[in-house]
Image (cartoon, helix red, strand yellow):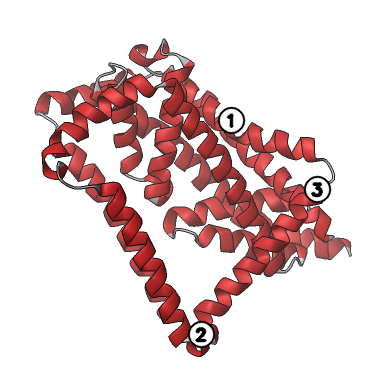
Amino acid sequence: MKKKVLLILKFIFFIGLGIFFIWWFQRKLSPTEKFEISNSFRSANYLWVFLAIIPGILSHLSRSMRWQMLLKPMGYHPKLKTTFAAVMVGYFANLAFPRLGEVMRCGILHKYEKIPVSKSFGTVITERTIDMLIFFVLFLLTLIVEFHNLKDYLYDSFWIKFADKFNNFNLTNFIFIGILIFIFIVFILFLIFKKKITSSNIYQKIVVILLGFIEGLKSLSKVDKPLLFIFHSLFIWLNYFLMTWLIFFCFDQTASLGLNVVLSALVMGSVGIMIVPGGIGIYPVIISQTLVIFSIPKTVGYAMGWIAWSSQTLLIIILGLIALMVLPLLKNVKNESI
């Protein structure tokens, strides 16, 4: 009962956060800007949206294949149709309840391929870690390539507004001291309540996750074709890039922008998806603010952000629902063939 209530509260919180970002952006728009956004939606070339769906599907398919490669060293050989369906159901579940998708993915493999959740969950965490490393590299690359534009934008938009409030305040030292104090307090509390902490359900779950992560790392070191694994890891992000780039051609104002702008939009948009799972509400705002740096009207950027977010979210919903309907049929076919 507590878990259900917690899931509902998480759902309400993140949906509320998304609605807040929509309201926060909309309240600053003038009637003229709202009309321009509406006009941007009407004038967009939606052929490019349909083309952007292709790399979207390819990224999900590549992720499914990469997952198979991580599971193989453990002695498990799930079918591609099962891993693909599990990935899509996972993405679909994450739209409603953040982080539920990872559990759902593993639950599907357990149900249809008899793979223990503790084993597959470790590979999912390993997957996420690899994706975060690639994202971090892309983030640094964006900072290097667009340092001048980003520096000027951040300085004009944020630093000037807050500099006076922090003139006599060394924020770096404060953060460093705060982290040390926090670590010290956690360490003392752990020593005092060690028995209660180690016997708690939360601690046991953390231990299971860590052990699964270690198992996932072991499988990573035993991958049969490491070059193919690296290819899939990069191919996933290449398709994310292509998805973003193709949406740029929906509008005349963004069609001629360089690949450096596409990279900036991809990276900053990914940050929004991390802040609010699924990126609801915040993704279009971040895309709009990012494109403003490159002299694109925020109304066009906002419309483009909504089109990009809506098309990929709709793809996840459709494929996720199809996967939920098809999985039981696959199981029945498998049982009949035995």
* Three-letter code for the amino acid on which mark 1 is drawn: Asn
Label 1, secondary structure: give it: helix
Residue lying at the far right of the rendered structure: 338
* Three-letter code for the amino acid on which mark 2 is drawn: Ser
The Cα atoms of the two marked residues, 3 and 1, are separated by: 23 Å
Which one is closest to the eye, mark 3 or mark 1?
A: 3
Q: Which mark is residue 200?
A: 2
Sequence-first tag of 2 and 1: 2
Q: In this view, does 177 lie above or below 226?
A: below
The Cα atoms of the two marked residues, 2 and 3, are separated by: 35 Å
Label 2, secondary structure: give it: loop
Sequence-first tag of 2 and 3: 2
Q: Mark 1 points at which residue?
A: 239
Q: Name the residue under label 3.
A: 223
Residue 150, image quadrant: top left
Q: Which residue is drawn at 40% across and 71% down?
A: 184
Residues under numbered marks 2 and 3 in contact, where contact means CB atoms less than 8 Å apart: no
Please rate how many residues cluster around mark 1, counting C-alpha atoms within 10 Å: few if below 14, some from 14 to 19, many from 20.
many
Label 3, secondary structure: give it: loop
Residue 307 seen in this snapshot: yes
Sequence-first tag of 3 and 1: 3
Residue 65, how many percent across, how many down? 73, 44
133 to the left or right of 247: right
Residue 121, how many percent across, how many down? 64, 62
Residue 146, image quadrant: top left
* Three-letter code for the amino acid on which mark 3 is drawn: Val
Q: In this view, does 171 lie above or below 192?
A: above
The Cα atoms of the two marked residues, 2 and 1, are separated by: 42 Å
